[in-house]
Image: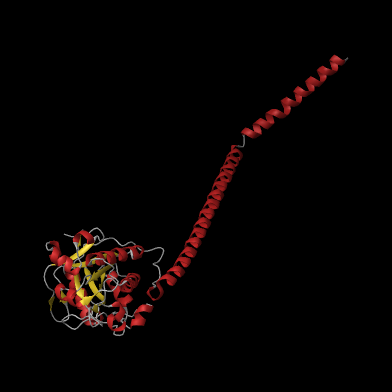
């Protein structure tokens, strides 16, 4: 009896399997589009998950960059506050964090005084001259042979000594923008130690008479600032920094020397603060200090020197320009081989193309 019942159950199960399983298999095989849809849904889910992870990673990176930028800005604010305290009236804002590239250029330049640069008609003519010739740069006075700043400066020290009293260039930024538009390389000329204006305001920063005291003056009646005086260094470097922030791509320091006619100078003058240093020491130390101070301002540096110093130690010592002290400090130096030739409006200098590495 039990055996019969088991057989009946087995037969019933097999009958049911024969009835339903083929139908299921047939239904599955007869709907391949559902299988494809399922596969596509699975693929879409995987891609969505991948995008989600990528978006999360992008947000994480952006947040890290934002926080790093905030830390950098805060460090910059703190550093500027410290510099303002340290430098006082010589303080200049730090350059932008994201400065544009400033590739070096083999400059072939024409020199413009502040008055020439401010003369719209003459300036336009010189722009055309540069574009029509092999010239590719302009050297523009920002602090001239009279010790005066030629543009409207925001520096506290310039206001204090009133060296911007005759600023002739009304809109330096617009001038530099025009040079940039025409791909003309701008060079700021800064006359350093031949500064007839500053000694009249800050006589303690100037070369002094040995015996009678007071300002020592050259044969032209002009006083010179003292190349050993660090305040003089900071003053000129502040102007250089501001020129770089305005858009000049190179700073050309001129009159980076002691007065010529050394026999008379050494007989009549005294240099406070020399502390046993030679003239060549003072010039080299100024250039090294300037290079360090301007390193982050994304500007190339040049110094005008007398060509004769390459062959005459006596001349080199008399004005403080010695190749072996200067050349390791500067990538660009501009030797003068003959005197400047002056014509109306423009002064044309024979060696305006700096020589890399010196002679």
Q: Nearer the viewer, residue 258 or 264?
A: 264
Q: Nearer the viewer, residue 350 or 44?
A: 350
Q: Is residue 216 left or right of residue 66?
A: left
Residue for point 59% across, 37% down: 32
Q: Is residue 134 visible?
A: no
Relative horizontal placement of residue 236, taking residue 316 as reference (left or right): right
Could you tell me which residue is drawn at 31 percent across and 85 percent down? 165
Which quadrant of the structure image shows residue 116?
bottom left
- Note whether residue 25 is visible: yes
- Looking at this view, name the residue that lies furthest to the bottom: 165
Locate the C terminus by quadrant: bottom left
All told, the count of numbered labels is 0
Image quarter (top left, top right, bottom left or bottom right) of the N terminus: top right
List x then y, in percent, for residue 243.
32, 72
- What's the colour scheme? secondary structure
Image height of 38 relative to 217, above or below: above
Outermost residue toward the front? 211
Rendered image quadrant of residue 109:
bottom left
Location of residue 150 in the rendering, given as x and y in whole percent from the top left corner: 28, 80
Q: Nearer the viewer, residue 271 or 325?
A: 271
Report the residue at 45% width, 68% height from top.
82
Residue 310, image x, y percentages: 14, 62
Q: Is residue 119 above or below residue 139?
A: below
Name the spot of residue 259 as percent of width and height, x first.
19, 74
Q: Is residue 332 above or below residue 192?
A: above
Q: Residue at 23% of width from left, 66% of height from top?
A: 278
């Amino acid at each position: 009896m039990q055996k019969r019942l088991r057989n009946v159950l087995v037969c019933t199960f097999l009958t049911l399997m024969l009835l339903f399983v083929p139908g299921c298999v047939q239904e599955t095989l007869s709907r391949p589009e559902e299988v494809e849809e399922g596969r596509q849904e699975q693929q879409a889910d995987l891609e969505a998950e991948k995008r989600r992870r990528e978006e999360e990673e992008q947000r994480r990176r952006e947040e890290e960059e934002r926080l790093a930028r905030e830390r950098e800005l805060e460090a910059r604010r703190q550093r500027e506050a410290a510099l303002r305290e340290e430098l006082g009236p010589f303080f200049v804002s730090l350059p932008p964090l994201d400065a544009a590239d400033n590739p070096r250029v083999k400059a072939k330049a024409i020199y413009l005084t502040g008055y020439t640069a401010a003369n719209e008609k003459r300036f336009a003519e010189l722009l055309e001259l540069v574009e029509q010739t092999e010239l590719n740069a302009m050297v523009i006075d920002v602090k001239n042979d009279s010790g005066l700043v030629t543009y409207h400066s925001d520096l506290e020290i310039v206001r204090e000594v009133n060296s911007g009293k005759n600023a002739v260039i009304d809109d330096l930024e617009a001038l530099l923008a025009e040079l940039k538009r025409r791909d003309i390389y701008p060079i700021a000329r800064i006359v350093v130690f031949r500064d007839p204006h500053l000694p009249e305001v800050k006589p303690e920063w100037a070369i002094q008479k040995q015996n009678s005291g007071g300002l020592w003056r050259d044969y032209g009646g002009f006083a010179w600032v003292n190349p050993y005086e660090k305040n003089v260094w900071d003053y000129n470097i502040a102007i250089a920094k501001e020129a770089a922030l305005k858009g000049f791509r190179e700073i050309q320091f001129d009159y980076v020397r002691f007065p010529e006619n050394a026999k008379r100078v050494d007989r009549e003058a005294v240099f406070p603060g020399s502390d046993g240093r030679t003239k060549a020491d003072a010039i080299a130390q100024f250039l090294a200090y300037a290079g360090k101070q301007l390193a982050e301002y994304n500007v190339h540096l040049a110094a005008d020197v007398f060509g004769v110093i390459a062959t005459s130690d006596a001349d080199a010592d008399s004005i403080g320009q010695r190749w072996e002290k200067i050349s390791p400090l500067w990538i660009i130096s501009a030797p003068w081989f003959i005197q400047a030739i002056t014509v109306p409006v423009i002064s044309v200098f024979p060696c305006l193309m700096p020589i890399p590495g010196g002679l």
